[in-house]
Image (cartoon, rainbow, N blue to C red):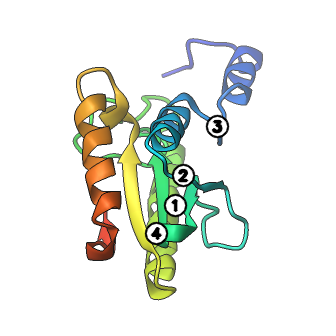
Amino acid sequence: MTDVHSKEVRSYNMSKIKGKDTNPELLVRKFLHKHGFRYRLHVKDLPGKPDIVLPKYKTVIFVHGCFWHGHENCKYYVVPKTRTEWWLNKINRNKSKDCLTEERLLHMGWSVINVWECQLKKALIRETLIHLNRILTNSRYITSTRDT
């Protein structure tokens, strides 16, 4: 099967995909700030350069794109029909790195929260952010929330 776009168009489209400051990430940051949580962004000294770091709570938040991080059983994680093996390898490497990063952070005493892009869609955003607030408010009880 061939790509529906030319190589140039596909390259341009892929170049526009951001790795940080994505809309889902901005939604979480805005919510946290509004609710009095102060944080740092993309701390290079921590494994995986977490999207959001809340030092006071010794907690990090990763806002994962469902496609790029292979969110199982999610309608936004669809394996491409072209270059399938290449994409599966890439996504599986991302998933492996995510697990290793989380293990390293937990070993360092950090709590890890993963928020998925699909959880920030209109139907679930309110519930997701309330849950996130509840987790942080009771942060002494968490170590890892793989499927927040």
Q: Residue at x 60, y 65 (%)?
A: 48
Disc ID at residue 90 = 2
Callout 4 touching callout 1 (CB < 8 Å): no
Residue 21 appearing in the image: yes
Residue tagged by mark 1? Answer: 93
Q: In this rendering, which labeled residue sits more in front, label 4 or label 3?
A: 4
Query: Could you classify mark 4 by the number of other residues whose Cα lies within 10 Å: few (under 14), some (14-19), or many (20 or more)?
Result: some
Three-letter amino acid code at disc 3?
Asp
**Of residues 70 and 24, the one drawn nearer to the viewer in this rendering:** 24
Query: Could you classify mark 3 by the number of other residues whose Cα lies within 10 Å: few (under 14), some (14-19), or many (20 or more)?
Result: some
Callout 2 touching callout 1 (CB < 8 Å): yes
Using the numbered discs, state the Cα–Cα distance from disc 2 to disc 4 in whole angstroms.
32 Å
**Mark 4 or 1 closer to N-term?**
4
**Mark 2 or 3 closer to N-term?**
3
Residue tagged by mark 3? Answer: 21
Using the numbered discs, state the Cα–Cα distance from disc 4 to disc 3 in whole angstroms.
22 Å
Callout 2 touching callout 4 (CB < 8 Å): no
Circle 3 — which element? Answer: loop
Q: In this rendering, which labeled residue sits more in front, label 2 or label 3?
A: 3
- Residue 118 in the image: state x and y as whole percent: 33, 33
Circle 4 — which element? Answer: helix
